[in-house]
Amino acid sequence: MCLAIPARVTQLDDGDMAVVALEGVKKRISIALIEDVEVGDYVLVHVGYALHKVSPEEAGRTLAMMAEAGVLAEELEEIAGGAL
Amino acid sequence: MNAIDPRPAKRAGSIDMAHGGGGRAMADLIRDVFQSHLANPILDQGNDAALFDVPAGRLVMSTDGHVISPLFFPGGDIGSLSVHGTLNDVAMAGARPLYLTASFILEEGFPLADLERIVVSMALAARQAGVPIVTGDTKVVEKGKGDGVFITTTGLGVVPEGVHVSAERARPGQKILLSGSIGDHGVAILSKRENLEFETEIRSDSAALHTLVAEMVSAVPGIAVLRDPTRGGLAATLNEIAQAAGVGVLLDEAAIPVKPDVAAACELLGLDPLYVANEGKLVCLCEPDDADRLLHVMTAHPNGADASIIGTVIEDDIGLVQMQTGFGGMRVVDWLSGEQLPRIC
Amino acid sequence: MKYVDEYRDRTLARTVAAAIRREARPDRTYHIMEFCGGHTHAIFRYGVKDLMPDNVRFVHGPGCPVCVLPVRRLDDAVEIAERHNVILCTYGDMMRVPGTKQRSLIRAKADGADIKMVYSTLDALKIARDNPDREVVFFAIGFETTTPPTAAAIKQAEREGLSNFSVFCNHVLTPSAIGHILESPEVRDLGTVKIDGFLGPSHVSSVIGSEPYEFFAEEFGKPVVIAGFEPLDVMQSTLMLIRQINEGRHEVENEYTRVVTREGNLKAQNLVSDVFELRQNFEWRGLGTVPYSALKIRDAFADFDAEKRFDISPKNSREVKSCECPAILRGVKKPTDCKLFGTVCTPDTPRGSCMVSSEGACAAYWTYGRYREAGSRVPREAAE
C-alpha cells in the first residue's frame, strides 16, 4: 500500500532535514522520524520522510536466503533426475 | 539568413490589453518581438496570409495547441516545444515539413522579456529544423483568463511518393522500434513543478524528428506506422495503434530504454515510465525483414542513437498491449486513466 | 537502484520460483492473503502469478487506504473544500475517487474549489506558510506508514505557530483490520473466504514492527510472513508461508528484515501517540464499523483538527448501488464477480474506489489481469 523507496543520504541539514539521492535524483526530505542518521546511510523514504534505516547486513542476508532456496531446489532436482 | 542572438536585450514591461487591441502597441509588439526574430521571406511579405508554392505530391497538415507549466523547463520551453511538437506530428505521416504557422494567446501581465525569450527559442528551433514560420496571430486575454502564454502551431508537409504511413497498417508479425529512452520530458517537467521539486540532470528530450524520419523512409519506404509517444507515453501510443488496426502488441520490457534517473524519479513519485510523456521520440512499425536495416539507420542518427527493437505486433482482436516483464512474468499495459498523478500508495 | 534492483532480479526469481514449485504440495491449494495493495500491485506489475504454480492463489486484502475510506469521509473533504473556502491539500491518490453521485475532488476542483495535490505534508506546511490569509487543510489518509509524517507536520505547525493549518484525519490501523477479517463469518464460520496465511504489510511494519501480528498468528492459527514490496520479496515470503503451512506452523516470520524489526520505529510510534489517540469506532468501506481501528487528533492539538475547526454537515452519503467494492475488499468476491466491472466501471469511469487506486483490486485486475481472461493469446514461444 505505502509507496516507499530506499535512498542514500547525501547531506544532513538543519531542522531535521536531509538530502537523499536515488541514482542522480536528489530530493530534500525530513529525517524527523528516525534517529542516528549519517551521510551514506540508506533510508526508506515515504511521502518526503525517512521512515527507517535500511540494514545492509539484513539486505544481503535476505538475498542469500533467496539464492539458497534455489540451491536446495537444484540439488533436489539433481537427485530427482532434473525433472521439473 | 542572419544569425539569431539567443540572448536578446532584456525587454522591460509586460503584456497589456493594448497589445491585442489592433493599435500601435500591437503593431510594435509584432514588429519588435515576432517579426524581428522569426524573419523569413514569406513572413516578411507582411500580409495576413502567407503565399507560397507547394511541391507536387500529397500534402499533410497538422495542428497542435501548446499549454505547459512551467513555461521554461530543463531542455526547452513552450516555444521550442511548440515547433518540435508540430514538426513531429507532420513527420509522423512520413512527410517532409515545409511550413509552420504560430498563434499566440497572451495573458495580460505576461512579462515581455519572457515572451521574447520564448519567441527567440521558437526561431532557433524553426531555423535548426529548416522550416520557416510563415504566418501568425496574437491575441491578448485578461489577467486570470490564461496561463501566461498558449501557443498553437500548424504545420504543412509533403509526403514522398510510395510512402503510406498509417496506424491501420499495423499487422501481426511486424516489429516495433523505439528511437530512444522514454519518460525524459515528463520527468524534466515534474522536477520543476511546484510542490514536487527534485533535482535531476534529466532534460526534456524535446526535438524535431523529421530528419530522422526522412532517413528512415528513404531506407525503408514500406514503413507501416510512425507515431510520437507524447502525452500518455509509450503505453498510450501503442494502445492507439492496437485499437486502430485491431491487433495486439507484445513488448519486451528489458528492451525498452529508460534512463536510471527517469526510473528513479518514477519510483519516488509512484509513476510508470511507460505512461510518462516524451517530446523527441518515435515509435515505428515495420516488416520483420526491414527491422535490422531500419535500426541501423536510426542508431546512426543523433535522434535515434539509443533506438531498439522493443516488441512485436501479434494477433489479438481485442487489441491488448502486453509486456513480458523484466522479472519474467506478463502484464497488460493499458491506456492511462485520466492524468498520471504522483501517488503515495 | 540499490536495495531495489536486486529484488527484481530475473535469475533469482526463477530460482525462488523453482523452489516454490518443488515445495508446494500438488494435493492441496494455498490461499494466501496479501493484505497490502502494495503486494497486489507487485504481483500484477511484475507478473508474479506467471511464476507461481496454479495451486498457489493470492487473495487480495483491504490494505489500500484509498479503497477503504468510506464515501462519507470523502464527501466531508469535498464539503470542507467547497463550503469553507479553504485550500485543501491532498495526496494525488485521492483526486479521482468518486464520492456520492460520482463527485470527486478533481470534479470539485474543476468547479472552482481550491484543491492542491501534494507529495508530502512538508508541502502542505509550505502552502500554509505561503498563504497566511487562507485556511489550509491537509486531507490525511493512510495506514501506520503515512501517519507519522502527519504527526510530524502537526508538531511542526505547532512549533511555528501556523494557526491557519489543520488536518482532516482519516488515519486507520492495520492490525484492527486484519483482526476484523479473521473474525468475519466468511472466514471463521462459513469458509467462503479461505485464508491459509498472510503476506504481512511491509512499510506499515517498518513503523509498528512485527510484534503486533503475533496475536493473530497465535489466536487464529494463521502464519504471517512480513514481506517486502519488491517482487522477489513477495515470492520468497510466499515460499516461507508454504513451508509454514506444510509444517503446520503458524508463526510470525519476517522476510523484510532490511527495514522491519520486531519493535519497529519507536521514535515514530511515540510521535504518533503524542498527537493522536484511538477513535472508538471508524467506518471502513467494505468492513463496516470497526472498533478502535482509526486515529483522531488529541485534544491538546485540537486547534489543528479540521473536524473541530470546521462545521461539517450530516449527509446521506452513499456508494453506487451494486458496486461490489465492499465484498471485494473483504475477499468474498473477485472483481470479475461484479456486474459493473469492465462495463460501466472502468479506470476511466470508476464507480468504486477499488477501480481508482492503482493498487485497488479492480484496477489491478483490469490493468494487468485481463489477458488471463482473454485466454492464452500470447504465443507460447513469445512468452518464454
Image (spheres, coloured by chain):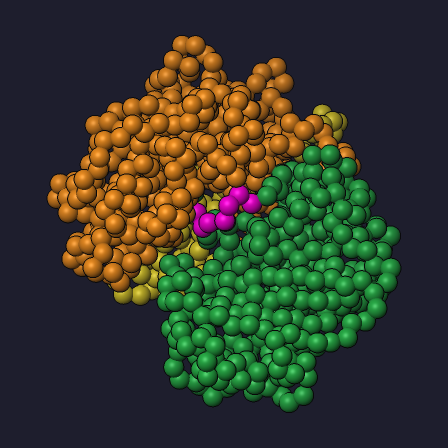
Which residue corresponds to the image point at 72% horizontal and 59% vertical from the top-left? B92
x, y (%) of residue C174? Answer: 34, 32
Residue farthest to the left, as pictured: C300
For residue B14, above or below residue B163: below
Instruction: Please say whether residue B8 is visible from this viewpoint.
Output: yes
Q: Does the magenta stretch include residue C168?
A: no
Which residue is at the front of the view, B123 or C230?
A: B123
> Is residue C268 placed above or below B231 in the rendered structure?
above
User: Horizontal and vertical percent for residue B299?
Assistant: 75, 65
Task: Between residue C325 and residue C96, name the one nearer to us.
Answer: C96
Q: In this view, does C375 lie to the left or right of A15?
A: right
Q: Which residue is situated farthest in the top direction here? A: C189
Q: Nearer the viewer, residue B234 or A28?
A: B234
| x and y, in percent, of residue C381 in the image | 78, 37
Residues drawn in magenta = B336-344
Query: Depth check: C276 or B92 in front?
Result: B92
Quadrant the N terminus of chain B occupies: bottom right
The residue depicted at 69 percent of the width and 52 percent of the height is: B255
Residue ID at (80%, 44%): B171
User: Is residue C259 something that shows in the picture?
Assistant: no
Is most of the magenta stretch helix, strand or loop? loop
State the hue of chain A. yellow
Task: Count the labels in the image.
Answer: 0
* Residue located 53% across and 43% down the image: B337
* Placement of C358 over or under B139, stated as above or below: above
Instruction: Identify the chain drawn in orange.
Output: C
**Chain B's colour?**
green
Judge from the rendering whether residue C89 lies leftward or rightward of residue B172; answer left or right.
left
- Residue B94 drawn above or below residue C236: below
